[in-house]
Amino acid sequence: MEVASNVRGAALALLAMGIYATHDAVIKTLGAQYPALQVLFFSSLLSFPLVTLVIMRDPKPGTLRPSNPGWVALRTVAGLASGMGSFFAFSQLPLAQVYAILFAAPLLVTILSIPILGERVGPHRLAAVVIGLAGVLIVLRPGGQALELGHLAALLSAVGTATSAVVIRKLGRVERPLVLLMWPMLASFVATGASLALEYRPMDLPHFAMTGVIACLGLTAGFLLILAYRAGEAAIVAPMQYSQILWATAYGWIFFGEVLDLPTLVGATVIIGSGIYIVWREGRGGNSANRPVIASRIRAETVTAPRTSLLQRIWPSRP
């Protein structure tokens, strides 16, 4: 039964990651014609009705006033960086290259968990982090290619994703999930709305509808991922996130004429190998008290793809 559950969890996670990759491919399609923050704004706008249906299920009464305003502020800024950075990076860079950089987030979670969670990181995981970060340099190949704003945005998104994940682990059960979910959403809506005053291009109706598709795909993938973690062991489900690189390679080649170059392939392999090793070490227990990578449900967070660990706490499983 356990094997069957793990297979089901892995299959659901693979499906979720395929939908997430489609979500990102649509972002890239629209980002070629419209400012990335404009795409994010309208996707966020159309996400609110769907997210409202979720938050109505929150069993805990209360307000949006945070109990830990400093940490919630950091979580909000990190969520903004994750969402804005990823939308901009997908609009500027090849899909596979963006994913390779975003896959550094689990490595950064391991580092940030030391000062924030008090996590003990042994030499094995520390070596995996160093090797993985070297993989990021292979992808970026400074001096070998002109580094663009898209690269900086992808790195910013990875840092934001990792910071947000660790802060949520830090707050644990002391802060309402709704508070942790809504403040970044509201901040993103205000910030991206303000950006329209700087640059706005009228959208055709089919393109506007595609922003709604982004919203639906992100939330659908999020709920599939929740089901995946409920069905299988986290140590089995978590590595499925790396399957996005396969989708990105296929989508990039078919729809955008992108070819996976050797440095990106080598760097992504190094990063993914390091990430899987860290998940394996955390799964074994040992000196990992919090298992921050396994527990973080790591995925570049946007308003259209909110953090699934928070959605799971708002939408509890039925007894």
Image: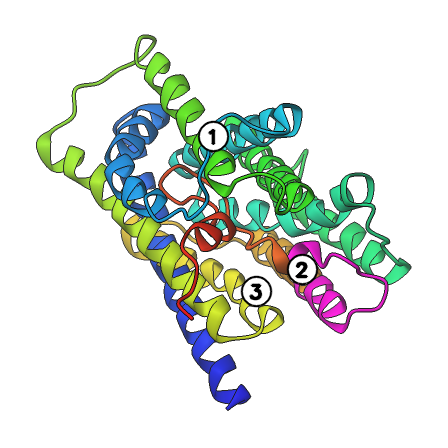
Residue 197 image position (x, y, % from top left):
31, 8
Q: Give the position of the C terminus as an image quadrant.
A: bottom left
Q: Which mark is residue 184?
A: 1
- Badge 2 marks a residue whose secondary structure is helix
Q: Disc 2 marks which amino acid?
A: Gly
Q: Which mark is residue 30?
A: none
Front residue of 313 and 169: 313
Residue pictured at 36% horizontal, 12% vertical: 194
Front residue of 241 and 49: 49
Residue linked to disc 2: 275
Residue linked to disc 3: 238
Q: Residue furthest toward the front?
A: 61
Q: Is residue 222 above or below residue 209?
A: below
What separation in Å lies between label 2 and label 1 (alpha carbons)?
26 Å
Number of numbered discs overlaid on the protein picture: 3
Q: Is residue 243 above or below residue 169?
A: below
Circle nearer the viewer, 1 or 3: 1
Q: Disc 3 marks which amino acid?
A: Ala
Q: Is residue 84 left or right of residue 133?
A: left
Q: Is residue 14 above or below residue 110?
A: below
Residue pictured at 71% horizontal, 60% vertical: 274
